[in-house]
């Protein structure tokens, strides 16, 4: 088969809803796009542990601390499922880590914002994980088998993340005036970054059409964002939170909540490395990666010793 | 593995969800020995009682067919429908068969 015939056959498989497995023939651009997307998704899960980790030692109760620890551990697990999916392409994990640490690979910009009060933990679980769920439920239908399977596993775990976040917000909104103000403050700071998580508008998104053709994505940024807004606005109102958008209106005909303009200058500033915490996030990752070096060395030495013993037996 | 790679060897993880059920592939982990592989697999893939038994096997030891050889490899099974019970005609009125 010529490459052109292979491409036609590949597209037929995609159109028929088949999953592509790592050893199957695929266009170079398909492999490249997925590798970039999966590794950046993995990095996002891992870096995403930092803003939440900031509150483990200051959680207001033992219950809250246990929940937060379990949630953060899940995010680490999500990162590992995704690195594992990316590795099916034959890329070495240390190469991906290096790309993250040198800034060659990006991660979700939302994790470059600081967590200033306890309600931020609520807002992250409810809004950031909520947005991630909308996106990841779509990605579970993606055409690349290992990615889709990792997404199914992740989606099963996300339900708890979002609910624990909303519970924090609901509790604070039922509390003192100070607590309500903290919850509203967190809402004000996390709302727009959450909407930005879905990426640029369809009209200005560089990868959308090819990704849709190959079912790397099966829904566009704007339609996913709208779904998130529709779900979340009502949840906000239900516990008395105000959505920080003066242009927010309900359209009875489309049954959508129309929202105001997103500040894309802010989005690109953060994507390009100049958000409030970009530097801190990567510096932290490098520091702990280096500090763990001796543990890895010891593990390798122990593994070798065991192999030797096994071969002597 | 590239030369500068400091990655531990890779292991594939298989989970048995229920006693008596099949072992299903879940993903992979990195570990320097089999015990570490099992522990990492437990921590990464079974935090919610997803399994009651695990297999780990080094990725290098797994061999697979490819999509390209699918037809050649599996087609011979297609024209042997006499391997299925419905191929056989039973006399009318036969029961329990
Ligand atoms: Fe996650
Ligand atoms: Fe999550």
Image (tube, helix red, strand yellow):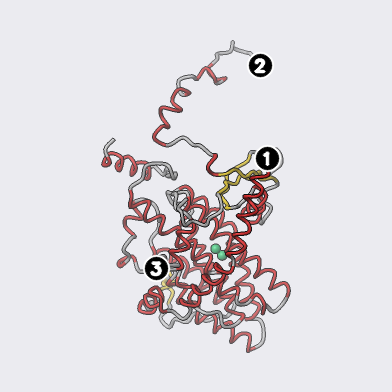
Residue A31's x, y, as percent? Answer: 38, 51
Q: Do the residues labelled 2 and 1 touch (CB within 8 Å)?
A: no
Q: Real-space Cα distance between discs 2 and 3?
A: 64 Å
Q: Residue at x 44, y 69 (%)?
A: A197
Residue A246 placement (x, y as % from top left): 43, 83
Q: Is residue A261 visible?
A: no
Q: Which mark is residue B88?
A: none
Mark 1 belongs to which subunit? A
Residue B87 appears left or right of A25: right
Find disc 1 in the rendering and name its residue. A312
* Tag nearer the camera, 3 or 1: 1
**Residue at the right extreme, as displayed:** A62
Question: On the same chain: label 2 and label 3?
Answer: no
Where disc 3 sits, the SS reads loop
In this image, A255 relative to A234: left or right?
Answer: left
Instruction: Give the answer, above or below, for where A180 lies relative to A305.
Output: below
- Looking at the picture, tell me which residue is in the foreground, A179 or B72: B72
Quadrant containing the C terminus of chain A in the rendered view? top right
Of the pair A30 and B1, the residue shown nearer to us: B1
Q: Where is residue B91 in the image (x, y as percent from the top left)?
A: 59, 10
Q: Residue at x 60, y 64 (%)?
A: A294
Residue under the image location 57 percent in, 19 percent down: B85
Q: Do labels 2 and 1 share a chain?
A: no
- Looking at the rendered image, the disc whose residue lies closer to the viewer, 2 or 3, is 3
The residue under label 2 is B95
> Mark 3 = which residue?
A199
Q: Which of A61 and A88 is in front in this view?
A: A88
How many residues crowd around disc 1 within 10 Å: few (fewer than 14), some, or many (20 or more)? few
Residue drawn at x 49%, y 64% as measured from the top left = A43
């Amino acid at each position: 088969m010529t490459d052109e015939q292979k491409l036609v056959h590949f597209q037929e498989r995609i159109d028929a809803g088949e999953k592509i497995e790592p050893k199957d023939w695929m266009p170079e651009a398909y492999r490249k796009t997925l590798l970039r997307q999966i590794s950046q998704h993995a990095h996002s899960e891992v870096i995403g542990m930092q803003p939440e980790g900031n509150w483990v030692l200051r959680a207001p109760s033992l219950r809250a601390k246990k929940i937060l620890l379990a949630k953060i551990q899940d995010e680490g697990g999500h990162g590992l499922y995704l690195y594992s999916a990316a590795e099916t392409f034959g890329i070495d994990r240390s190469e991906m880590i290096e790309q993250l640490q040198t800034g060659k690979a990006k991660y979700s910009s939302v994790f470059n914002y600081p967590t200033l009060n306890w309600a931020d933990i609520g807002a992250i679980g409810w809004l950031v994980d909520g947005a991630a769920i909308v996106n990841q439920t779509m990605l579970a239908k993606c055409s690349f088998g290992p990615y889709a399977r990792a997404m199914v596993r992740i989606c099963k775990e996300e339900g708890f993340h979002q609910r624990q976040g909303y519970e924090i917000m609901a509790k604070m909104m039922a509390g003192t005036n100070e607590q309500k103000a903290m919850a509203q403050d967190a809402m004000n700071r996390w709302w727009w970054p959450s909407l930005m998580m879905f990426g640029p508008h369809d009209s200005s998104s560089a990868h959308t059409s090819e990704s849709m053709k190959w079912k790397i994505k099966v829904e566009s940024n704007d339609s996913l964002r709208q779904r998130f807004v529709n779900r979340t606005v009502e949840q906000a109102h239900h516990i008395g939170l105000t959505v920080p958008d003066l242009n927010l209106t309900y359209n009875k005909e489309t049954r959508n909540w129309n929202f105001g303009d997103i500040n894309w200058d802010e989005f690109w500033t953060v994507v390009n490395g100049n958000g409030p915490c970009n530097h801190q996030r990567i510096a932290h990752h490098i520091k702990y990666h280096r500090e763990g070096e001796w543990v890895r060395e010891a593990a390798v030495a122990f593994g070798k010793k065991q192999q030797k013993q096994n071969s002597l037996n | 593995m590239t030369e500068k790679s400091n990655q531990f060897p890779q292991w594939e993880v298989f989970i048995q969800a229920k006693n008596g059920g099949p072992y299903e592939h879940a993903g992979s982990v990195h570990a320097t020995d089999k015990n570490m592989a099992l522990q990492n697999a437990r921590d990464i893939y079974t935090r919610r009682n997803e399994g009651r038994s695990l297999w780990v096997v080094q990725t290098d030891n797994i061999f697979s067919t490819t999509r390209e050889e699918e037809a050649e490899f599996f087609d011979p099974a297609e024209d042997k429908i006499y391997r299925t019970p419905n191929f056989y005609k039973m006399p009318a009125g036969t029961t329990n068969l």
